[in-house]
Image (cartoon, rainbow, N blue to C red):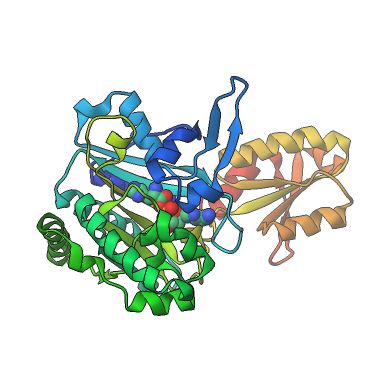
Amino acid sequence: MIEETARKHAALYGFEEIETPMFESTAIFKRGLGETSDIVSKEMYVFNDKGGDELVLRPEGTAGVARAFISEGLAQLTPLKLFYRGPMFRYERPQKGRYRQFYQIGVELLGVEKPQADLECLSLGYQILKNLPFADGMASSITLHLNTIGDLESRAAFREKLVAYLTTRKSELSADSLARLERNPLRILDSKDEGDKRVIAEAPTLTAYLNDTSKKFFDDVVGGLEILGLPYKIDPLLVRGLDYYCHTVFEFTTTALGAQNAICAGGRYDNLISDLGGPKTPGVGWASGVDRLALMMAEISDQTPTVAVVPMGDEAEGPAMKLCQELRSAGLRVDMAYGGNMGKRMKRADKVGASHAIILGSNELSRGVAQVKTLATGTQAELPLGSIASTLAKELGR
Ligand code: HAM
């Protein structure tokens, strides 16, 4: 249902569905996401196939879409708007909202360098979230966090200043952040460690090092959100954990799921396709965790009425099966009681929430009838076998 809603609204925005393989060459993720990213350094399910190639169960969708874009020669088709869905795999510590096999819906808009592309993706994210049947209070628990990490030039200038500053406070950093200091210092900015947070609070900010191009790009994204009336919160410490991003980065978070609070996240990646050996092609997109969205949704009860068919004795099995077929064809959900005594079978009818139980014994069979019991009242009526499906379908509004 989440996927259907997403697919429908993605189509309204002109996104077409793409399906990429569930496993890919490891090199794509190493080059695309960066060797120092958590995903590549700790979380990939890697294996060798019989030919000796190193493959990985895909941990995310963007690098695979970029690979398909290059190998299928899709560059002539840009701008390309792609929607995908499917399982992703990460070796993470499982907990509520974080699984080793989880499901994403995602979109990638390729070939547009203007901020309008970022806005279209953000607007689509909002539209999908708005149309999901969240439980009470869940929709208002969602906030869009937005930041820019600028272009390569801005990031290089900032990185230098940040490393210089953090080096002076090295002794206060957590072990994780120390390990990142040389390899991926920007990631230290979104550390959750309290000691790190104190150091970060006084760190230089990326905003101060943005060049004019990067500043204008971000201003245009923010201006567009204002025009569209989409709320956002600028979060200067949001950096995201994948190396392919530049300029816009964002996360829709919820306060309803504890630590696993990101429900949809993404950003711009203008260098990913060229880094993977393709033509220079800008891109922007997001992916959303279906499992997390599902945790926030109201239980939707299926209203299809259920009927239990209870054959008594071997000779009743065949006619009971035929009756099941007729009832299902009439639009009713049918549960067939396979074994046990009458009491056990009636208990099962209750358990599956059946409104009626149809009892078929040898006595009834010889007369071409069955007992139809209304479980709520306990009343029972004898009906000709041939009319049961149509009578019940009418009574149950099918
Ligand atoms: P990501 O932030 O790694 O980004 O994942 C996107 C979303 O997938 C998260 O916000 C979360 O909802 C869900 N998710 C991630 N890991 C898990 C897990 N272990 N269990 C359950 N849900 C999870 C990406 O994957 C990028 N490819 C997004 C993107 C697309 N950027 C540009 N285009």
Residue 305 appears in view: yes
> Which residue is more in the foreground, 262 or 149?
149
Which residue is located at x 28 percent, y 60 percent? Answer: 160
Which residue is located at x 31 percent, y 40 percent? Answer: 272
Instruction: Answer above or below: position of 74 versus 371.
Output: above
Which residue is located at x 47 percent, y 76 percent? Answer: 172
Instruction: Answer above or below: position of 187 versus 328.
Output: below
> Which residue is more in the foreground, 392 or 73?
73
Residue 290 appears in view: no
Can you give x and y, in whole percent of width and height, for residue 193 in the image?
Answer: 49, 73
Could you tell whether 176 is left or right of 165 in the image? right
Could you tell whether 96 is left or right of 134 in the image? right
Instruction: Answer above or below: position of 200 versus 286.
Output: below
Could you tell whether 324 is left or right of 113 in the image? right
Quadrant of residue 219 in the image?
A: bottom left
Quadrant of residue 273 in the image?
A: top left
Total marks drawn?
Answer: 0
Can you give x and y, in whole percent of width and height, for residue 337 in the image?
Answer: 78, 47
Can you give x and y, in whole percent of width and height, for residue 277 in the image?
Answer: 31, 30
Could you tell whether 136 is left or right of 303 in the image? left
Can you give x and y, in whole percent of width and height, for residue 245 in the image?
Answer: 31, 50
Which residue is located at x 34 percent, y 24 percent? Answer: 71
Instruction: Answer above or below: position of 322 versus 39.
Output: above
> Which residue is more in the foreground, 229 or 184?
184
Q: Name the residue at the top extreme.
A: 51
